[in-house]
Image (spheres, grey):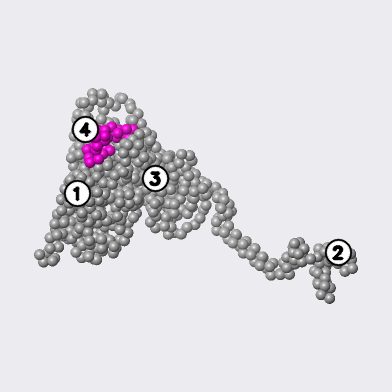
């Protein structure tokens, strides 16, 4: 009975299946029907898949679910297709949009001159580039795949252009907040904005057969400075870690203190910049906490040295936490703009000692204090910067690094070899004059005005629009133009006495020489670079293609010996109230490079007019004078070399490391004595 029921059920299923396929019924007693029933088994049905099909047909809800899923997928596809601008290939990840390829190709014509903001220039069919900032430009260039994507406004995109031997490729690095260890890489050549060269650290090591990386300090252990700082605990406050004057000077001082036996702790207010790895290599301890831990460390220290006006915020909080802490602070202010005074004026009178870099800077700050009725606790001291021993060693100036196998005379010869090797890497000829301006790229340093002056030279029209520029020109020089000309002629005659072959070369305009001016601007990638100013420079270069052929860029680096060795003229074109001091000025002079500087600030205390360099007015009024000074340097190489020799002598007398630390120990000793006297008065002695 059970067998007949099961067979009946099977026959119904098979009969129904057969009917659905053929459209006709099979009689129960038909032989074919009996063969099918007799050969059927559950295993065979499972193997043939008929059971699964019957289950699929019996569950109509599956059709409904599949239909819903299909419509959902279709809706998502249509929505994404519309949101991505009908870019099917890009949406699918194949990066087939020709617009992205155009951007990738055009990126070969610009430079990543910024470190903390992205800047992309794309040619639009004319000579004027379209400059996009990270707030407006939303295309991401990924290595190997160019995939368009949208990112949050809070994220900052940064385009890094890699220097490669083959076809340049563009890559992108994402920054969220303060990124660490960002790779700096650049294209080799760019016909629109100039070429990027360097850095030349490995070339220096190979030619000089010596590397400063192997040294951690050059302390003169028998000197007064070593005796003063030995076994003392000091805290140094850095406002940032960019490769600029103040942070580098503080880092070198920390290295010197550490090598002389002092215990050093560094408080870094902003890790913006690339010196963190260098501090670690020099074994300088960095306090991660900028508040409680740094305050406790400073309270236990013998002295706190703050290295910038920006340190005012930390000093204010420290004195609020420890009211007597102002008596142990020596504040080394290295800025000379009113904005820095305004942010620090509320704590100037609360520290024990103020130190400035130049007399002019000190007078400027004292005038501001008088305007604000601020009474300082003591008269400020002057501690100028100096050429460190590593640079003096390469320049051939006697220093603590010299050995019998590396005497100053031998280093001078190696410096000449380094000059030839670096200039060859830059593609310069012997007759080319390399003009260098090495600093962060911002309006205060005047790189755009320098390029405008060079453009006047190239166009052979020093007056530009003729009488209009001449009428507005205010040449604020110490000597008249005629007196300066006679002085320079005498200088050339003096320098040519020992070399009779140069007399016909200097002022003989009939002899045509193939000469060219090349401009080297740094520092690419510096955290102190300003976005709008870089945009203005790029626009100016795009409008003057002939000038751009003479422009070279160099990345931010601490290895600058090769750059000074290759340079012929250094331009200190600081604007506003002028350069505070200009450490790069004395470094260039140490390498025998004459300086063309603005007639304001501390530069006038370093450079002697018509002896170690020439001055020009600040602002656009000085462009014509700077252009004439550059033309004079180009046409009179012998006078240029003589100015370099005179400047080198000045550095040897006033601006070496022993001069700076000798002055510094006098100031710190006076500060420590006052600190001890204040402590004794507090406890009733």
In the foreground, 103 or 641: 641
Q: Give me the C-alpha separation between circle 4 and circle 1.
A: 44 Å
Asked whether 408 falls inside the magenta stretch, the response is yes
Which quadrant, please, contains the N terminus? bottom right
Q: Residue at x 23, y 56 (%)?
A: 234
Regarding residue 245, the answer to whether it shows in the image is no
Q: Of the numbered discs in the image, which one, if any, rests on residue 538?
A: 3
Regarding residue 105, the answer to whether it shows in the image is yes
Instruction: Nearest to the eye among marks 4 and 1: give it.
Output: 1
Residue 329 picture quarter: bottom left
Residue 679: give x, y in percent of width and height: 14, 63
Q: Residue at x 38, y 34 (%)?
A: 427
Say which label, 3 or 1, has the lower sequence index: 1
Residue 394 picture quarter: top left
The secondary element bearing badge 4 is classed as helix
The residue stretch that appears in magenta:
393-420
Say which label, 3 or 2, has the lower sequence index: 2
Instruction: Nearest to the eye among marks 4 and 2: give it.
Output: 2
Do callouts 3 and 1 mark residues in contact (Cβ within 8 Å)?
no
In the foreground, 228 or 585: 228
Q: Which residue is mark 1?
A: 226
In the foreground, 257 or 185: 257
Q: Which residue is mark 4?
A: 488
Do callouts 4 and 2 mark residues in contact (Cβ within 8 Å)?
no
Q: Give me the C-alpha separation between circle 4 and circle 2.
A: 123 Å
Q: Residue at x 52, y 49 (%)?
A: 145
Q: Give me the C-alpha separation between circle 3 and circle 1.
A: 48 Å
Residue 536: give x, y in percent of width and height: 37, 47
């Amino acid at each position: 009975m059970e067998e007949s029921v099961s067979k009946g059920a099977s026959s119904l299923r098979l009969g129904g299946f057969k009917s659905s396929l053929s459209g006709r019924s099979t009689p129960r007693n038909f032989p074919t029907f009996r063969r099918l029933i007799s050969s059927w088994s559950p295993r065979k049905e499972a193997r043939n898949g008929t059971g699964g099909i019957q289950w699929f047909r019996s569950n109509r809800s599956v059709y409904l679910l599949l239909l819903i899923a299909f419509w959902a997928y279709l809706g998502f596809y249509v929505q994404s297709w519309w949101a991505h601008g009908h870019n099917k290939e890009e949406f699918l990840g194949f990066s087939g949009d020709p617009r992205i390829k155009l951007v990738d190709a055009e990126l070969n014509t610009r430079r990543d001159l910024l470190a903390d903001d992205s800047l992309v220039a794309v040619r639009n069919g004319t000579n004027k580039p379209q400059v996009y900032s990270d707030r407006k430009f939303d295309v991401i260039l990924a290595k190997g795949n160019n995939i368009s994507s949208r990112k949050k406004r809070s994220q900052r995109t940064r385009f890094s252009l890699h220097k490669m031997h083959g076809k340049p490729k563009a890559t992108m690095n994402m920054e969220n907040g303060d990124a660490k260890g960002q790779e700096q890489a650049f294209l080799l050549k760019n016909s629109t904005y100039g070429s990027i060269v360097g850095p030349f650290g490995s070339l220096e090591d190979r030619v000089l057969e010596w590397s400063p990386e192997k040294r951690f300090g050059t302390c003169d252990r028998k000197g007064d400075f070593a005796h003063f700082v030995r076994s003392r605990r000091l805290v140094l406050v850095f406002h940032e870690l960019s490769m600029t004057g103040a942070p580098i000077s503080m880092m070198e001082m920390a290295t010197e203190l550490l090598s002389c036996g002092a215990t050093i702790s560094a408080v870094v207010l902003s890790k913006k910049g690339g010196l963190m790895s260098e501090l670690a290599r020099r074994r300088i301890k960095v306090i991660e906490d900028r508040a409680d831990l740094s305050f406790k460390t400073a309270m236990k220290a013998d002295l706190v040295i703050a290295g910038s006006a920006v340190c005012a915020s930390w000093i204010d909080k420290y004195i609020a936490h420890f009211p007597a802490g102002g008596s142990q602070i020596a504040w080394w202010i290295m800025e000379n703009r009113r904005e820095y005074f305004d942010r620090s004026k509320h704590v100037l009178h609360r520290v024990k000692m103020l130190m400035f870099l130049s007399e002019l800077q000190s007078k400027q700050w004292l005038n501001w204090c008088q305007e604000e009725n601020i009474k300082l606790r003591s008269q400020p001291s002057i501690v100028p910067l100096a050429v460190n021993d590593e640079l003096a060693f390469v320049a051939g100036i006697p220093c603590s690094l010299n050995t019998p196998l590396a005497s100053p005379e031998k280093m001078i010869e190696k410096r000449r070899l380094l000059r030839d090797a670096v200039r060859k890497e830059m593609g310069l000829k012997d007759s080319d004059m390399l003009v260098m301006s090495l600093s962060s790229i911002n309006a205060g340093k005047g790189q755009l005005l320098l390029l405008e002056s060079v453009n006047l030279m190239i166009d052979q029209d020093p007056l530009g629009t003729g009488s209009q520029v001449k009428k507005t020109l205010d040449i604020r020089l110490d000597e008249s133009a005629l007196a300066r000309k006679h002085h320079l002629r005498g200088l050339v005659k003096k320098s040519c006495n020992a070399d009779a072959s140069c007399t016909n070369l200097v002022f003989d305009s009939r002899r045509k020489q193939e000469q060219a001016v090349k401009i080297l601007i740094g520092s690419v990638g510096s955290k102190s670079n300003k976005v709008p100013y870089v945009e203005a420079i790029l626009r100016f270069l795009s409008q003057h293609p002939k000038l751009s052929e003479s422009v070279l860029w160099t990345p931010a680096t601490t290895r600058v010996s090769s750059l000074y060795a290759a340079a012929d003229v250094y331009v200190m074109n600081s604007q506003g109230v002028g350069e505070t001091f200009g450490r790069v000025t004395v470094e260039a002079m140490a390498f025998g490079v004459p300086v063309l500087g603005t007639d304001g600030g501390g530069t006038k205390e370093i450079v002697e007019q018509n002896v170690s360099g020439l001055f020009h007015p600040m602002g656009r009024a000085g462009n014509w004078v700077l252009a004439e000074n550059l033309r004079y340097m180009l046409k009179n190489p012998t006078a240029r070399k003589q100015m370099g020799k005179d400047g080198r002598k000045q550095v040897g007398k006033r601006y070496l490391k022993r001069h700076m630390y000798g002055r510094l120990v006098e100031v710190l000793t006076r500060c420590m004595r006052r600190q001890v006297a204040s402590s004794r008065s507090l406890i009733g002695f």
